Every structure is written in structure tokens, then in C-alpha cells.
Image (cartoon, rainbow, N blue to C red):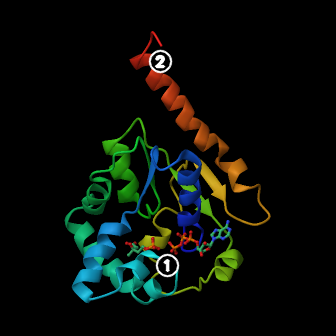
């Protein structure tokens, strides 16, 4: 989803519904921001948060991250997933085709893609304003076309509730658990 569409909000809700023992939220931008904050002497908590601080550095972080991705497109995907122990991973910020391709290649059976969508008006109310070089670049537009998402979540006040929209996604987890138990513990 695009800036201020509510990716973090929606992924945190999924995690809350599944519980943190079952589900972890992974951010591809986590290791990127850690390294970038260290190299530039910045406040990592603010870079990770939803406020305006990170927007001051976004264009440069994109450039910085793209230099790493250029060498190795799976670089941040590998770092972000390292050590994740829960059975369900929700990746909150896949923004590029190369991100999706990495997960489809590494976890072809398990990967599902979800688009979080909000109108420009709603995103503006959440603090978004169009920035040339950011909102017209791959980081925001790389998944705008050519992807058949498994689910599209409309994160708007006048849309069906998020719980209602997330229902099929949360059900998928019970189905996977059912098959896991069925095939691994047939006598139970
Ligand atoms: N359904 C909602 N109800 C109330 N507040 C929301 C909702 N969705 C998003 N928000 C708020 O809007 C702001 C932006 O949301 P969030 O940080 O989840 O977006 P994002 O897509 O992760 O943005 P970015 O990647 O640009 O940081 C946050 O302050 C969040 O709490
Ligand atoms: C630099 C970047 O990772 C920032 C992402 O920040 P956020 O997910 O919007 O909080 C975006 C990108 O790499 O395309």
C-alpha cells in the first residue's frame, strides 16, 4: 500500500487478532532504517514511527536502500525474516515487485499478497502530501499495476469494518493450522 494507506495499522490489527505468539509483523524497512540511522546519527524510534520525522529522510533513505537492493534485491527481505519464529509472518511494507518476487520464490506455498488501499483524501487527513521523487517513484508505484493481489483491503471510514474485511485472511490461518494438525497428528 501507499504512504499513509494504513499498512502498519492494518498489520498491527492482524497481529492483535492472531496474537503475538502466532503472528509477527516484519518490516523490510526495519534493517534498512537501523543501518541508515546508525550511519547518519538519526533517531531510530522516530524513523520507525508514523510521525513526520521519517518523511524528512524518506527520499534519501529510498536512494540509500536502492543502492543496496541494486547489488542484492533480497538483501532486506533476508535480514527482516532472519530469526522470525512465529508460524504467521505479516510483512507490512512490501513496496516493490522484487520484494514480492523474493517471497514468492522462497515461500511459494505460503505467500499471499494483500493491498491496503485508501483514497488520497483520507491519506491527506493522515498527514500525506504529494512529494515529487517519492510518490511518483518505484517505492510508491512499483506495485500499482500488473499484480493480482490475493486480497485488497479498503482502509476508509465508509468501507466495511476492517474486522469484516480481514475475516478471510484470519480464516486462512485456521485452515492452515487445520491441515497442519490433520497431516501431522492424524490420530488426534
Ligand atoms: N483505520 C484507521 N483508523 C484510525 N487511524 C488510522 C487508520 N488507518 C490508519 N490510521 C492512522 O493513520 C496514520 C498512518 O497509518 P500507518 O502508519 O498505518 O500508514 P502506513 O501505510 O504504514 O504509512 P507510511 O508507510 O507512510 O508510514 C497512523 O497515525 C495511523 O494510526
Ligand atoms: C526507505 C523506505 O524503506 C522507507 C519506508 O518507510 P515506511 O514503511 O513508510 O515507514 C522506503 C523504501 O525503501 O522504498
Q: Is residue 118 shown above or below 109?
A: below
Residue at image position (46%, 22%) is: 181
Image coordinates of residue 84 in percent, x first then y, are 33, 50
Image coordinates of residue 72 in percent, x first then y, are 22, 62
Image coordinates of residue 78 in percent, x first then y, are 27, 55
Residue lying furthest left: 71
Q: Is residue 109 shown above or below 36?
A: above
Tell me the SS state at disc 2.
helix
User: Sequence order check: which comes first, mark 2 or mark 1?
Assistant: 1
Q: Is residue 160 shown above or below 54?
A: above
Q: Is residue 114 left or right of residue 79?
A: right
Identify the disc placed on residue 152.
none
Which picture quadrant has residue 186? top left
- Residue 150 can be seen in this image: no
Q: Quadrant of ligand 2?
A: bottom left
Of 61 and 44, which appears nearest the observer?
A: 44
Mark 2 to mark 1 CA distance (whole Å): 47 Å
Which picture quadrant has residue 47? bottom left
Image coordinates of residue 152 in percent, x first then y, are 62, 53
Residue located beneath label 2 in the image = 182
Residue located beneath label 1 in the image = 136
Amino acid at each position: 500500500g501507499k504512504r499513509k494507506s494504513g499498512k502498519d495499522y492494518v498489520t498491527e490489527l492482524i497481529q492483535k487478532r492472531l496474537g503475538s505468539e502466532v503472528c509477527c509483523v516484519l518490516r523490510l524497512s526495519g534493517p534498512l532504517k537501523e543501518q541508515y540511522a546508525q550511519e547518519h546519527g538519526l533517531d531510530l524510534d522516530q524513523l520507525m514511527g508514523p510521525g513526520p520525522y521519517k518523511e524528512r529522510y524518506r527520499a534519501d533513505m529510498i536512494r540509500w536502500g536502492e543502492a543496496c537492493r541494486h547489488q542484492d534485491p533480497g538483501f532486506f527481505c533476508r535480514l527482516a525474516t532472519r530469526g522470525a519464529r512465529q508460524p504467521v509472518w505479516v510483512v507490512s511494507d512490501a513496496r516493490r515487485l522484487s520484494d514480492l518476487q523474493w517471497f514468492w520464490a522462497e515461500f511459494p506455498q505460503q505467500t499471499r499478497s494483500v493491498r491496503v488501499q485508501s483514497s488520497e483524501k483520507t491519506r491527506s487527513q493522515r498527514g500525506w502530501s504529494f512529494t515529487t521523487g517519492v510518490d511518483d517513484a518505484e517505492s510508491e508505484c512499483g506495485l500499482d499495476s500488473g499484480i493480482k493481489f490475493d486480497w485488497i483491503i479498503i482502509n476508509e471510514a465508509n468501507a466495511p469494518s476492517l474486522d469484516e474485511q480481514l475475516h478471510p485472511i484470519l480464516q486462512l490461518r485456521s485452515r492452515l493450522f487445520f491441515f497442519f494438525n490433520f497431516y501431522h497428528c492424524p490420530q488426534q
